[in-house]
Structures are given as structure tokens and as C-alpha cells.
Amino acid sequence: MSAGSNVAQRQPIDGRHRKMFIGGDWVDAVSGETFETRNPATGAVLATVPRGGKQDIDAAVRAARAAFDGEWSRFKPYERQVLLLRIADLFEKHWEEICHSDTLDMGLPISRTRANRNRVVGMLRFYGGMATALHGETIDNSLPGEVVSFTHREPVGVVGAIIPWNAPTAASIWKIGPALATGCTVVLKPSEEAPLTPLLIADIMAEAGVPAGVVNIVTGTGREAGSPLAEHMGVDKIVFTGSTATGQSIIRASAGNLKRVSLELGGKSPVIVCADADLEKAVPVAAMSVFANSGQICIAGSRLFVERSIHDEFIARLAAYAEGLRIGDGIDPATEIGPLVSPRQLERVTGYLASGREEGARLVTGGTRLTEGTFAAGNFIAPTVFAGVRDDMRIAREEIFGPVISALPFDTLDEAVERANDTPYGLAAGVFTRDVAKAHRLSRRIRAGSVWVNTYHAIDPAVPFGGYKMSGYGREGGVEHLHEYLNTKGVFIRI
Ligand code: NAD
């Protein structure tokens, strides 16, 4: 197999500056400008990275197009498979380095970055496996005479991938993996809040022998680099993960050449705890459905509907669990809750804490920024539970993206479903019950892309993940995901 004649090298590290990756070269922004990325637990500057802009995006799209039309187009499915499996092996080899990078750059505790291995390595192997399983179909037609008709599945072309900061490794791989499996090329724009692991991933692509231009990484802000990528006439498809508001701008920006768009957006996911649930097991799972990654997860189960007969007991247990969580710098393996990613995010979450109080919710636990001792330099918020929340309060309607649970009692299941579905979002939901029939009924009636019963956060490479309603469209994971990177061509041959 050809590993690519024009293969890049790992980035030579020069102090704390990192370069971006375009056409197989490590480069700075054309403007020469940079920005700092900081450790959210300590405030320390970790590195400076290029502040890419329109010209850099142009260069990356040109490189991606040249690779797509050139050497990469000659890679057979089997060769792409071998390459993806090699990349997966390199992720295993560098896994600790990757986990450290994510933890330092965005604060997720190292115990959790380590636990995400299957979402990354497993995903790469899944797509590696799928690279040789993609095929068109022969379809019988009703045309007069002898005409054979069949379909080809072809890569859409150059994919622009724009990702958020809350899971940089998984978000990068969930875009790059299917692109490589299908034969597309990629220009990835990481979040300005957490650009370091995507640059490390570029290193791994180079080490694996990915041909130059197949994967390009341009760092920069949403306005300066993300927007030109979404608008670019040379991009065939945009895959975006981020907020709903940005998703809407991306749709508008993509209109110029009607590029294909898939969107993984925000959520305000309901969790329904029935009176027959195993409370011992439900409490930690319901708590961590929100507190994991300090609530900075799109699927956070932040609206907690609890059947009235167990409401008070459940909330008391939940508060005790929250108060026992170990908060600190994520680099400590014992840490369960790390900091919020940035001072901006801290301001946003403390704004919601104030709004909850002002609108009359009852603060059960947490509700404050932690500022004592080593917490002072970081963006730490105590895990928070509000009870007595009404459906119309802002903390029950808007995505907070912080460690805040809004608890709401309910009396009947019909009422719980109706209120759970009363949201513009539809990303995920949780149900806790011991009754199998109830589990089936609720999972059918909730309008969300993922429903978890007696568990939460379960994500598997083979199972599609994505949103209903304003949580986006398109799926990541599963075979459906690959079809979003493919065009279908119908061919008729008269014989
Ligand atoms: P964001 O929308 O602010 O930014 C996401 C990315 O878009 C960043 O790279 C940013 O630079 C870029 N961007 C910003 N404005 C842009 C524009 N006008 N044009 C092009 N690109 C632009 O989101 P965030 O704060 O980084 O992440 C948090 C959000 O992401 C939450 O709403 C969360 O629910 C969502 N999210 C969703 C999923 C999912 O799978 N559904 C996963 C993780 C995060």
C-alpha cells in the first residue's frame, strides 16, 4: 500500500508556540497573529497558537482539494482502512499524552478523558472496518429494453469541520474518522478555547502517514476562521458541533454554494425518575448526567423530573452525592469535577445561578463560585441543585452548560412526558424505572435522538447519535454517519 508520497512530519516543538497544519506543513497564520490558550484550573498560559483567518482557510481548502483530486483519490478502500487502523494504534500509543492535553487545555478530569478511549479509538476502528464495507447497489428498473442500473457511493469532497471545546479529541475524531473512511479530505477548525489536542492529532496524522492535505487543522476564532470556512465556495460539506445559535449562522453561511450541512447542537435534556426506580443506582447516574465535565456536555440531563412521592428523598440524596464530589485540578487522578473552561463560561453560569434565585427556585446545594485557596486562580463552580423549579424559569428552559440541576416534581407519566418534550431541543433523555413496559413506552414517547434507561452517557461507535428539533440534524456513529459523507450516483447502462 502507498502510505502517501508526500507525507508530513511531526511538529518540531519550539518553546510554547504551536503551529497549525496545512497541506502537510506546520505553519503560522499569514497575518503572523497568535492567541494564548490557558489552563482553566490554574489560569497559566499553556501555549500560543496561530490566529488563523480567511487566507489560512483558503490555503487549507486549496490543499484539501488538491489532495482530494490527487493522490488521495487513488487510495483504495482497503488502503484507507489500513491507514485508519494505524491511526487507531497510534492513538493507543499516545493515549496518555492526548488525555493530558485535553485535561490541561479544557479542564475535564483526567479520569474522564481516560475513560473516553472507546469513543475515540473504538470509533477509529469502527470506521476503519467500515471503509471496505461501503458499496452501491444494483437496482432492477422498469425501462424498456435491456438497461442495467446501479449506484455508486462517492465521497462528497472537501469537508469543513468546526468543533467546540468540550470534547476536543472525540469531536475531532468523529469528523476525521468518517471523512477518511469515505475518501473525503478535511479542514478542521478547533475551538479557540481548546486548540491543543487537535494540533496533537495533526501530529498523529503525520506519524501515521496520512498524505499531505488530507487532514488540515486551522486554529482561530469562530468569526475569523470558522465563518470563512462555513462560507467557502470550495467546501462541499460542513459538519458542525456547537451551540444552536452558531449552527443557525452556519446554515446561513453555507447557502452560497448550497454545501451539505450536518449539525450537532445544544440540548436541555430531561431525566425522568419514576417512583419505582432503584434510587441507590439512580442518584449517582442522574447526578453525573449533569456534573460530569462540570455540566459542559451537550447531553447534560439538566431538567430532572422526579415523581412526587420520592421527590424529597431523591433530592436529599442527590444533594448529599453532589456535596461529596471531589472538585479540583483535573490533572489529579482523584478529581471528579474540574473547572469550567474559561472566565466567560464562569460568568455565564454564575448568571444562571443568580437567575435561578431571582426567579424563586430553592437552592438545595452549591450555587457559588469556589474561590478559596487553589480554587482562586481557576473557574470552579460547586455542583448545584435547584429544587422547586417551574417549567417557565430560565434555568429550566435554557442550556446552562454548567454543573446545575433543575429539579421539577411530577405526578403522572403523561404529564412528565409532555413537560419533558416541552423544549425546543431534542438531543437526549434519561429514564429511571424498574418497569420494563414503562421503559419502552417512555423511550418511544420522548422526542430526542438518544434515550438512556437506567444509565446515561452510553455512546457506542456503532449506534447513531444526534438531535431532534433544534438540537440539529444528521447523525454521528453508526453506518448512517458514513452516508452523510457520501454522494449517491445512479448509473444506467443500455446493453
Ligand atoms: P460555539 O457554537 O460557540 O462554538 C463552536 C465552534 O464554532 C467553535 O469552534 C467556534 O469557534 C465556532 N464558531 C463560532 N461562531 C462561528 C461562526 N459564526 N461561524 C463558524 N464557526 C463559528 O459552541 P461552544 O461554546 O464551543 O460549545 C458549546 C456548545 O456546543 C453547547 O451549546 C453544546 O450543547 C454544544 N455541543 C453539542 C454537542 C452535540 O453533539 N450535540 C457536543 C458538544 C457540544
Image: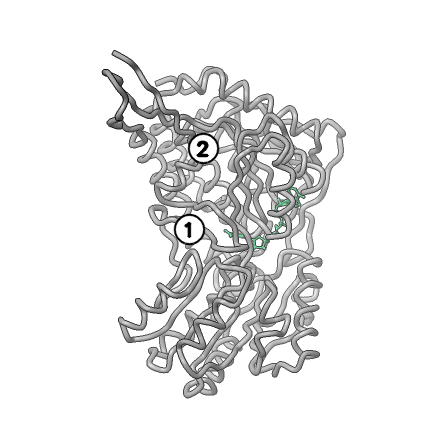
Q: 136 left or right of 158?
A: left
Taking 280 as reference, is 476 above or below it?
above
Task: Give coordinates of residue 9: x percent, y percent.
Answer: 52, 24
Q: Amino acid at mark 1?
A: Phe
Residue position marked by numbered label 2 in the rendering: 179
Cα separation, mark 2 vs mark 1, equals: 17 Å
- Give the percent coordinates (x, y) of residue 349: 66, 66
Which residue is located at x 26 percent, y 26 percent? Answer: 141
In the picture of the structure, the residue carrying the numbered disc 1 is 465
Q: Nearer the viewer, residue 8 or 414?
A: 414
User: Closer to the N terminus: mark 2 or mark 1?
Assistant: 2
Circle 2: residue type = Ala
Q: Dot 1 lies on which element?
A: loop
Q: Decide if residue 186 is in sight here.
A: yes
Q: Position of residue 173 (x, y in %)?
A: 46, 40
The answer to whether residue 331 of the structure is visible from this angle is no
The quadrant of the image that shows the N terminus is top left
Indicate left or right for 468 with 35 as reference. left
Q: Is the CB of mark 1 within 8 Å of ligand 1?
A: yes
Left or right? Give the position of 311 relative to 243: left
Residue 274: name its quadrant: bottom left
Query: Image point 31% across, 73% down: which residue?
Result: 438
Tell me: residue 419, above or below residue 151: below
